[in-house]
Amino acid sequence: MAFVAVLGVLQGFSPFEMFLWGVALAVAAIPEALPAVVTVGLALGVRRMVKRHALVRKLPSVETLGSTNIICTDKTGTLTQNKMTVEKVYINRAVLNVTGGGYEPVGDFFRGDEPVSKDAHLHKLLVAGALCNDAGLIQEEEVWGITGDPTEGALVVAAAKAGIWKIALEEKHKRTGEVPFSSERKMMTTLNNSKDGLYAYSKGAPEVILASCTKIFLGGHEEQLTPEIRQEILDTLHDMANQTLRVMGFAYRKVAENTLPEEAEKEMVFAGLMGMRDPPREEVKVAIATCADAGIRTVMITGDHKITAFAIARELGIFREGDLVLTGIELDALDDRKFEEIVEKISVYARVYPEHKLKVVEALKKKGYVVAMTGDGVNDAPALKAADMGIAMGITGTDVSKEASSMILTDDNFASIVSAVEEGRNILKNIKNFIAYGLTCHIGVVLIVLIGVLAWQILPVIAVQILWINLITDGLPPMALSLEAPDKGLMKQKPRKSTEGLVSKRMIIASLGLGSLIAIQSLGVLYWSLDNGVSLPKIQTLIFTLVVISLMFNAFNWRSDRNSIFSLGIFTNRSLIYAVLSTVLLQLAAIYVPIMQTAFRTVPLSFSDWAMIIPLASTTLIAMEITKYLEKRTHR
């Protein structure tokens, strides 16, 4: 700009005038409003995301959402409703069906058509499930609900269906000690006093419980747990898991008075299995299909049994032909190199520990993927921190997991992740579009002034007019563009590459083309006006106004870089209509209000002037519409 200002002085303009002009041109060339507009655009987008149950903690992470191509998600509560109901029970080498749904303690246990709620074997199992438990069953305004973990709540409800109420049971069986459940141990044990002595009750992953047992409660008394019966239990477990049931095993043992809880978890008596159903969220299957269309893979990570995880993943569309299912034990058996070779084929991880999540994230990132990872526990924090997009659960999540995350789901729902991805892509699209809109303005003004000075030794627009153009065109219209709704095909596009900048080659070409078009029109008006003896103030007013009105037509171009304004609907972004009308009114004031005429050195324009300006200005919109049409035809 300094070079051109010096050139203007050499052409005979005063140094002071060229200094002001150089500063104004520098302001016009530099998009100084961009940081503010981008920040406001991000903030407005984040506010929309909150309405869709996604709370973004860090604004820059919105850009990451637009590039995400793998989502690693928990199952329980995220893909499913987290409303457990016991549907099947295995006791005394037989499977019982359980009726009733939800948390209302109404239902019964059936062997075939015969109710067996008073069966002694069933009683042992339900007592173990109710005592080794921290949940509660409550009734408020005739509506039944639970307190605590939904899985434990389902066990309390199942016991209540057989007339075993947890509160009354605990009064007779006081808890004296416990070993809490952990994702590493995959079991929980309590010690409870009763009139018969001290008993240990355990629940957890069936294979873990089974490994701690040497006996089974069978035929009304305790018997040795033979390899044949052990295999039968495992077969039953697999059958339940194949029915997408989450299965838990239960055991008990009478122990000496001075026994520590940790010492009780051996030589136990197997009491039975309970299979619970946690229905998938209705919207999740559609959300996963939407992810697939958008080029985003969904990977399930769960502590459930391998068969249960596989069955649910297949039902939801996560598992596809040729994919792999891996357990935590199998993952531990692989070295890093071997794991990285197959990580792209694995769609389900079962019976995993929190540290496995970190291993999965690191392997996928080494492959060049942009990974989003969900988590809710304290031990999930390292994986959430390592992921490109850590997503914590707002309802069940711990404070530590939330602190380590970039985004929090306020409803713990996988579908909200997909909504956030769509909104993130839309925010990026809008930012890129108003950057392209701004580039058109800056390129056009610089070319007009530069060529005008070099070719005719005339300033087509003066410094104060350049500043006015910059002020009103970089103000309201870009803000309104940031409110543009997502394009219809937005979630059918592939994720944006993480290495791709905000300004693409295509944007630069389009902005350069439109900016050049505005410059050519303005210089054409300059040439025609000089030929017809029009005064310099009138020429400058004509070009000044032509640029502003052209940019207002151009604002409609950048509602979408691909779709026609007519397919979007002219009035669907009312904020942009109001922004354009406000800008036009301000420009009219600059031309017709006497005090502003003095400030901007403008003169009033006639109807014939407007008859020339409006058709010329509209060519920016027409040219872009033709380009979009040709691109769409070529793409097809």
Image (cartoon, rainbow, N blue to C red):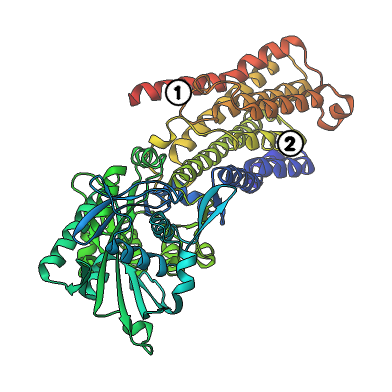
Location of residue 31 (image quadrant): top right
Could you say which is closer to the camera, residue 540 or residue 279?
279
**Residue that appears at 76% across and 23% down:** 536
**Residue that appears at 34% across and 39% down:** 289
Q: Tell me if I can see residue 351 in this picture.
A: no
Left or right relative to 623: residue 188: left
What amino acid is labelled 2 in the image? Gly
Q: Is residue 44 above or below residue 412?
A: above
Location of residue 578 (image quadrant): top right
Query: Quadrant location of the N terminus?
Result: top right
Which label belongs to residue 627? 1
Q: Position of residue 281 (x, y in %)?
A: 41, 44
Q: Is residue 414 above or below residue 273?
A: above
Q: Earlier in the sequence, mark 1 or mark 2?
A: 2
Q: Is residue 347 above or below residue 525?
A: below
Q: Position of residue 354 (x, y in %)?
A: 37, 67
The residue that label 2 is drawn on is 12
Could you say which is closer to the camera, residue 42 or residue 556?
42
Q: Residue furthest bottom?
A: 258
